[in-house]
Amino acid sequence: MAIIKWEKKASVAIIHMCNGANRQNLEFAVQMNHCFDDILEDKDIFSIVLTSSDEKNFSQGIDVEWLGQKMNDQDFDSIKLFMHGMNTVFKRLLLMPVPVIAALNGHTFGNGAMLACTCDFRFMKKDKGFFCFPEVDISIPFLPGMIAFVRKAMPEYKFNEMILSGKRVGAQELEDSHVIVKACDNQAELLQDALAFARTFTKKRGIFGELKKRMHKDIVRVMETEDTQIIEALNLFIQE
């Protein structure tokens, strides 16, 4: 079953996560990477909008039930594949040779918030949904690469507040802190504004991709070195 689909509207590819809360597991990573492959094959696409088909959720982050079952089964290879697969998703978004606009239509928690932060721009509707890093409450530390790319998406003071408090933040506060481009009134306005913004980009992929590669080279280096060591050691939880 497809849990991620995409459609083309003129020069824009719209990716729809379509699995309810859009919790991330190995299949999520596999399908998202396949989606990127398909989009990049179409040379007439100059921007991407990433959103969800669910009325309440953009993405609630890691599929903890899936992860817990894999831990119980001692299927550590699948956990590592998932973690590496999601890091590939994050890295590809950071280096995507077209602009990626996240249209946050609902709750954006944990790895879902990470996904949004790897995008180049963000819009969010303000009538429903929160943005949150709950890792401090569930004893799952950020990977070093996550710390690096979240910092490129929000001011340091807001990052410091959110990562250490686990605070739930609404769209207007995110707009005031320059984390999102606009807090939209409702779902219709969100998609309309994100799509209109995406259509303003007609940059050549070569220069756009090279700029992002140079901008994010230090983030990618951390992901490919420090993250890899932590994932391979399965040093993913804090016990005390």
Image: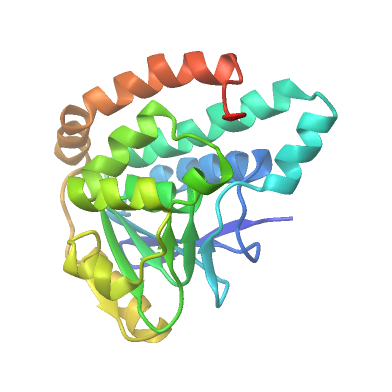
Identify which residue is drawn at 35% across, 71% down: 170
Identify which residue is drawn at 57% across, 27% down: 236
Q: Is residue 52 above or below residue 96?
A: below
Which residue is more in the foreground, 49 or 179?
179
Q: Position of residue 183 (x, y in %)?
A: 27, 76
Q: Position of residue 147 (x, y in %)?
A: 33, 35
Decide if residue 161 is on the left or right side of residue 29: left
The quarter of the picture where residue 27 lies is top right
Q: How many marks?
A: 0
Quick check: can you spot residue 155?
no
Q: Is residue 103 above or below residue 126?
A: above
Q: Position of residue 187 (x, y in %)?
A: 42, 82
Identify which residue is drawn at 30% across, 62% down: 11
Quarter holding the C terminus is top right
Q: Is residue 47 above or below residue 230?
A: below
The quarter of the picture where residue 121 lies is bottom left
Identify which residue is drawn at 32% across, 72% down: 171
Quarter holding the N terminus is bottom right
Which residue is more in the foreground, 143 or 58?
143
Decide if residue 240 is on the left or right side of residue 191: right
Q: Position of residue 109 (x, y in %)?
A: 49, 56
Specify how the rendered protein is coloured: rainbow
Quick check: can you spot residue 46?
yes
Decide if residue 199 is on the left or right side of residue 69: left
Farthest front residue in view = 240
